[in-house]
Amino acid sequence: MTTQSSGPDLGAGVPVADVPDGTLLAGTVAGEGVVLARSGDAFFAVGAECTHYHAPLADGLVVGATVRCPWHHACFGLATGEPLRAPALDPVACWRVERKGDTVFVREKLPSPASKPAPATGPRSVVIVGGGAAGLAAADTLRKEGYDGALTLISADASAPYDRPNLSKDFLAGNAPADWIPLRTPEYYAERRIALVLGARVTSLGLGEKRALVEGGASYAWDALLLATGADPVRLPVEGATEGQIHYLRTFADSQALVARATGAKRIVVVGASFIGLEVAGSLRKRGIEVHVVAPESQPLERILGAELGRLVRKLHEDHGVVFHLGETVKRVDARAVALSGGAVVDADLLVLGVGVRPSTALAEQAGLTMDRGVRVDACLETSAPGVFAAGDIARWPDPHTGEAIRVEHWVVAERQGQVAAQNILGRKVPFDAVPFFWSQHYDTQISYVGHAEKWDAVEVDGGLDGSECAVTYKRGGRVLAVATISRDRQSLQAEADMEAAARRRDG
């Protein structure tokens, strides 16, 4: 896509002084949007937009010879445009840069980098179990890294890998058509010789014979295997509710079914004040549906974001008409009457349950892999079985930033782990050391969160907690564990870079 942008004509040249070290300058070359970046004495020029959701890279951050996206922290190599970290999977274009004296000129667009040669050694066949964020990112990375062997991605989902974060956001709100949701086209898989096996449930990893078995009798040989089975929604029994009254949101089919049911609904009860539950509430309000949220906690998201941001999130939703019933649970359902533990009765068309997920570890347990509230992996994401890797919601890895083994259920983390696992399948011995990142959208307010803080002893708030802009820092023992921001994209990126630098210093 050609980006129309504003700013100086970079082809005509700009003074070196206009681009201080570590900065980005938006401009144009032949009418196309380009960002000029400087790292030390080196200058680079790349496309103006991130290839994920088209965020303006000029608002991002230069870290070494990379540029990071301000919205969702994708990372690109400035010299090649290569996507180094998800959520962006496609490169940005690059232009040749020439410096003459005190002026920098952006010249012609450069051709795409040549394909990488096939690794000298590596597995003859790779099987990926799971068609979510980690699975697709791993398959994508294997081919980008030159792997030319057999590659099979097996998914229990009937749909090809899709943009799961969108299911509770724009797609559910009615702002994104269905054809935006698949992450890749059918041609992508065919061209890269990725055998996509959908609607197939793996019953055994076959560690002894290295052959994964699928319901129905099919089997797939592997020399290396990635287990990326994700998580399943926690299902709660609701007394009196019929099957048609209860909805969960995990798959594309779930979101499509909820959209279909919501079309004629006037009032919906959302059970659970999780990120998913609240994003569902916000999306349904955008459809004009009355929403009641029932949850046992005293503030939404308090366990993850603390009381300060919890109150802010609650107010955002209340300002948009959401009714909260906190400190309560659903006692029973009688036809349309939803009885709450506090005595209130809400008349509702249906209930959406968003009370969390559980990692899908049954296959790993059956195979005898070492478990630790998830699948235990080493720094390179390899499990206790040689040649078997795990990534995404199921993986508990040694995090260099907290100094603890952690497991994180977020999209970007899963994608990045898929990318790193793919490199290590090829023998690269790359540790997974990315700072965890996620974002959550509530109407026009995005909360960006870098780091990981399960427990903290200090919270520092900078800015106003009115929903306009702020940063909340979570610390333990004086160490910064995580930073949540609203409308402070560069501060979020800088916090990520600072955490990375701190981990490097601790490692010596």
Image (cartoon, grey):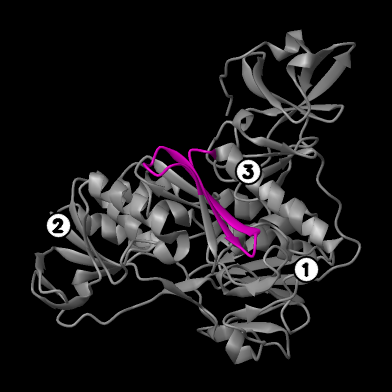
Secondary structure category for the residue under label 1: helix
Callout in the foreground (3, 1): 3
Give the mark nearest the N terminus, 3 or 1: 1
Label number found at residue 493: 3
Q: Report the front residue among 205 and 463.
A: 463
Please state the extent of the stretch shown in magenta in the rendering.
461-488
Mark 3 closeness class: few <14, some 14–19, many ≥20 residues within 10 Å: many
Q: Is residue 436 visible?
A: no
Callout in the foreground (2, 1): 2
Assess whether mark 2 and mark 3 are in contact (beta carbons under 8 angstroms).
no
The stretch drawn in magenta includes residue 481 = yes
Assess whether mark 1 and mark 3 are in contact (beta carbons under 8 angstroms).
no
Q: Marks 3 and 2, Cα distance to the nearest angstrom?
A: 39 Å
In the rendered structure, which amino acid carries the disc numbered 3? Leu
Where's residue 79, x and y in %? 80, 35
Q: Which residue is mark 2?
A: 267
Q: Marks 2 and 1, Cα distance to the nearest angstrom?
A: 49 Å
Residue 315 located left or right of residue 77? left
For the stretch drawn in magenta, what is the main secondary structure? strand
Mark 2 closeness class: few <14, some 14–19, many ≥20 residues within 10 Å: many
Q: Is residue 413 visible?
A: yes
In the rendered structure, which amino acid carries the disc numbered 1? Ile
Callout in the foreground (3, 2): 3
> Image height check: is 213 above or below 107?
below
> Image height check: is 288 above or below 298?
above
In the rendered structure, which amino acid carries the disc numbered 2? Arg
The stretch drawn in magenta includes residue 205 = no
Q: Residue at x 18, y 50 (%)?
A: 289
How many numbered callouts?
A: 3
Q: Report the front residue among 265 and 208.
A: 265
Q: Which residue is mark 1?
A: 425
Where's residue 377, x and y in %? 70, 77
